[in-house]
Amino acid sequence: MSFSLLINGSEYNCNVFRETVMIREALQANGSTMDGTIQLSGSLAVPLGGHEVKFYKGGVLEFAGRIQSVNHTRPYNANQYQISCADYTVDFDAQLIQTILEEDTAGNQLRRIVGLVGRGFTADSIAEGPTVGLQEIEYEAPSALASRIAESIEHQWYIDYERNLNFFFVLDRAAPVASIDFDTNVTDYADFDFNVDASQVKNVIYLSGATVKSGSNASHAWLGDGATTFYPLGYAPWAVNTTTVRVNNVPLEIKLDGVDSSAGDGGSGSNVYLCLDNWGFRFPDNSAPAEDAAIDVSYKYEYEPLIVVEHAASIAFMRAIENTPTAPSNGRHELKFQLPELRVDNEETIIDYGNLLLTRYAYPVYVGKFSSRTQGWGIGQHFTGISAQRGIDVEFYVTSVSKTILQSSGGISEFKYEIEVTSTPFPG
């Protein structure tokens, strides 16, 4: 099966040493990479960092991206170079983003990001996903935004070799085989090695720092004195549209202080300005309520709860493992997690976030690797790994695939895969 290499559109097909080609594919912003050595001939140009690279196997694009570094491998051979390449994520992150992503489906937020990036990136392989909250973006890398959105809803993403952003639920991509028994099939799936890391186990999580809208309204009342224009509130008001101010039982039009107007600007007596930062509202300087005017306010307010979520099955599991007469354990592994940028309408959103964290941290993580000549392995796939000898029956996620060119006895070239898997699809 033929292989071909293009650098900035020029063919280097006969100039690449196949045994040196190594393609490593990974999820998220880890990026996929390719290394290889080329021998220049004729009028072929010296490869440079930034040049576009495309590598094909039998007409199928197996890698595309840009050269990151060029190493002159042999001083006495001026025409031999080792190139190290990264996928198009480097282009995706070339410019930082400043914007506001309104509350929407995850898919629509990512389409918005792709549109802001431009540069020929497409959004044809984006799953819709559930709704995620508003995000104010201040000069962040697009890949960081994609990772944050994906991890909040158990999705994954990567940039493919056609400059297309792929976004999918973690269980939507099946491996070439549904399950592997690593005890019995050591020919197709060899050198299986794994470790178990229990240091990350957290099964009781305290969530704090998030801001929640109150379910009930707070209310206050005053009598005007003909001079006072600012009236303080007992709590931080949630928003303009959840606040009502009346004078003598007549509702006033509420605007946002510091945005629609500032102190000293004057204004109409039918307006009142809500001060979110100062916990109050003010009348225009020349429109203080008259003496003995009845002033009342009703409003939703914000508060910061402490939410606790627990994983009962994990607590029991860890207690069974850890508890001994000389080293007693109740199985609880606690974590305090801050959510300072989360502003939500109800506590259920925080509870959902906590339960998502529990799915990632409640159990020890299995990390493994094996080699395979079964074709078709790719990042984001999942399968069940079984080994009675090792005591595992685990759903594994493919997080990294390394491909090298291997020529079979029949003369047909194919890939040999080195596959890295984990029992959690997310890094960290």
Image (cartoon, helix red, strand yellow):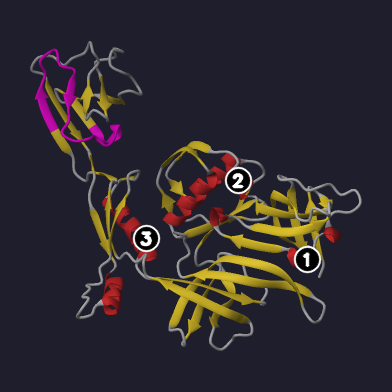
Near-viewer residue (83 or 29)? 83
The 10 Å Cα crowd at callout 1, few under 14, some 14 to 19, many 20 or more, is: some
Identify the mark nearer the N-term, 1 or 3: 1
Would you identify the image quadrant in which residue 292 lies?
A: top left
Instruction: Quickly name the residue at label 3.
Output: 356
Residue sticking out furthest to the right: 42
Q: Is residue 356 above or below residue 121?
A: below
Residue where numbered disc 1 is placed: 18
The magenta stretch spans residue 223: yes
- Residue at image location 60% in from the left, 85% down from the top: 186
x and y percent of residue 371 in the render? 62, 76
Q: Residues within 10 Å of mark 2 (few under 14, many from 20)?
A: many
Residue 14 in picture, x, y percent from top left: 86, 60
* SS at circle 2: helix
Q: Is residue 245 visible?
A: yes
Q: Residue furthest front?
A: 76
Mark 1–mark 2 CB contact (< 8 Å):
no
Quarter-of-image position of residue 24:
bottom right
Question: Of the residues tagged 1 and 3, which is closer to the observer?
Answer: 1
At label 3, the amino acid type is Leu
Which residue is depicted at the point 49% across and 52% down?
147
Calculate the distance from the C-alpha at mark 1 to the C-alpha at mark 3: 44 Å
Instruction: Read off the magenta span.
Output: 220-243
Q: Please identify the quadrant where the N terminus is shown.
A: bottom right
Q: Which mark is residue 109?
A: none
Q: Quadrant of the C terminus?
A: bottom left
| Mark-to-mark CA distance, 3 and 2 | 28 Å
Is 206 one of the magenta-colored residues? no
Q: Which amino acid, mark 2?
A: Phe
* Side (left or right) of 398 relative to 253: right
Q: Position of residue 308 (x, y in %)?
A: 24, 58
